[in-house]
Image (cartoon, helix red, strand yellow):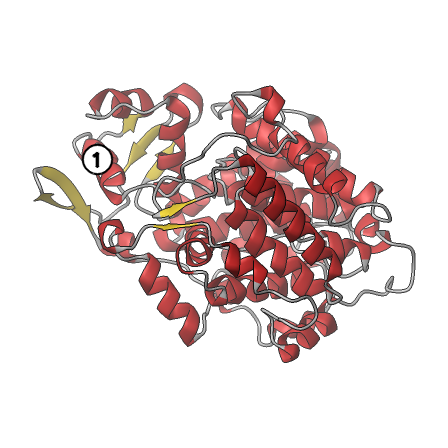
Amino acid sequence: MPKHIPEQELEAILAIVAAHPEGAQAATIHEGLDVKVPPRMLQRRLALLIEQNRLVAEGRGRGRRYRLPPGEAAIGSRNGKRAITGEASQAEVYPPVSLEGAAIKQAVRERIQNRQPVGYNRAFLDAYRPNDTFYLPAQTRQRLLEMGRSPDGQRPAGTYARRIYSRLLIDLSWNSSRLEGNTYSLLETERLLELGESAEGKDALDAQMILNHKAAIELLVEQADEVGFNRYTILNLHALLSENLLADPGACGRLRTIPVDIHGTVFHPLEVPQLIEEAFQQALDTAAAIHDPFEQAFFVMVHLPYLQPFEDVNKRVSRLAANIPLIRGNLSPLSFVDVPERAYVDGILGVYEINQVELLRDIFVWAYERSCARYSAVRKSLGQPDPFRLRYRDLLAQVVADVVRSRKDKKEAAAYVQQTARRRVKPEDWVRFVEIAETELMSLHEGNIARYRLRPSEYTVWREVWK
């Protein structure tokens, strides 16, 4: 999982930024920290603070500066350290959850000192009986099936995924990487995947993570009739997703033989290699025996991260493995559209620490609904028009039109969208506004340009630059 970052570490960064009203560069922040962290870890913390609307980033590359959001000015002291509070820091986007999910959320957000340390519970896996035990209720599974059906249901495995491959590749690569703290924007991801161009000022490891997702997704789609819950598929998924990201290259695609710690949780994974091997094979055999594709997908999202069979990159493997039954069955894939990182982490912690799946289940179901809407599997699943889009309808239209008329390429468009969001959108809405605007630009074609009052000639000229 993205390693859980203690609040005091984030507060230390905010305190340094607060002392620089003109904005602080990453180097300045790094120098001011009492406890030094590697540059990549610092970038992850800065990205998290931006996502939480507790920091604003301005500029690109080495000149990039970080400031407090407008109105974020109440500075106090806590335990001898400066702490920052304000309305923007309280804003949190979270999917709707059940009463059971809400209870789990509350439990895993207790101070870590108040949570009981636990180890891997093999009985949790042993208790699951394929096609008898169900984490997803029958009504939920049927609803997901109705939403996820595609016109290619009876065609060869992977047909539907191939039809939407370009969109799926970008969405799943970006969203899965984003859940790991990756700082690339949607447009920057598209540019990297289509043109091989890395974003300026971004860590090379972020680019590597996204490119690894591309290779793993290609495996799932191109070999849809062969992949499954077997050692070949899961080990090779890990090898592709972890390439050039692990300290030991030999650990790619290999079950771990060393202990691992997960920062920010009281859960301690298995340490004995033989037990890891046994539980891994049992989890695969159990998953392979499940008939329902959605139960199968959710099972691996629960048990692969819980086991931690690899030295790292376990959750990425589970998210892509969850798509195996969906791609094979020509169902709408799961690309984790709009899933907040904190909500996903809370759901995973509920599994780790108390073996309860209800919060992660709520997030899984909500995420699948969003993915279905993205791929037009069942438009009616979202019901009424999105209030967020209605609120920013005019500004979104203006941004798209401005990008086209000024003939901006993808790199320029990404910068313009972010600048507009900072100037004209509420801080708590920045992240979602940028994603929607970038998606609108990527979905623009000659058949929908009228809604932005664009002429065919304007679109044609811009499209050459955009490509």
Please tell me in which quadrant of the rendered image residue 210 appears.
top right
**155 left or right, relative to 317:** right
The percent position of residue 80, horizontal first and vertical second, equals 7, 38
Q: Is residue 148 above or below residue 256?
A: below
Is 178 positioned to the left or the right of 173 in the image? left
Seen at 36% across and 36% down, the residue is 45
- In the image, what residue occupies the spot 27% across and 50% down? 112
The residue beneath circle 1 is 12
Residue 399 screen position, x and y as percent: 54, 48
Note whether 20 is above or below 301 in the view shown: above
Residue visible at 26% across and 26% down in the picture: 29
What residue lies at 67% left-to-right and 42% top-to-bottom? 170
Asked if residue 289 shows in the view, the reply is yes
Residue 452 place in picture, x, y as percent: 64, 55
Q: Is residue 60 above or below residue 321?
A: above
| Amino acid of disc 1 | Ala
Lateral position of residue 301 relative to residue 375, left or right: left
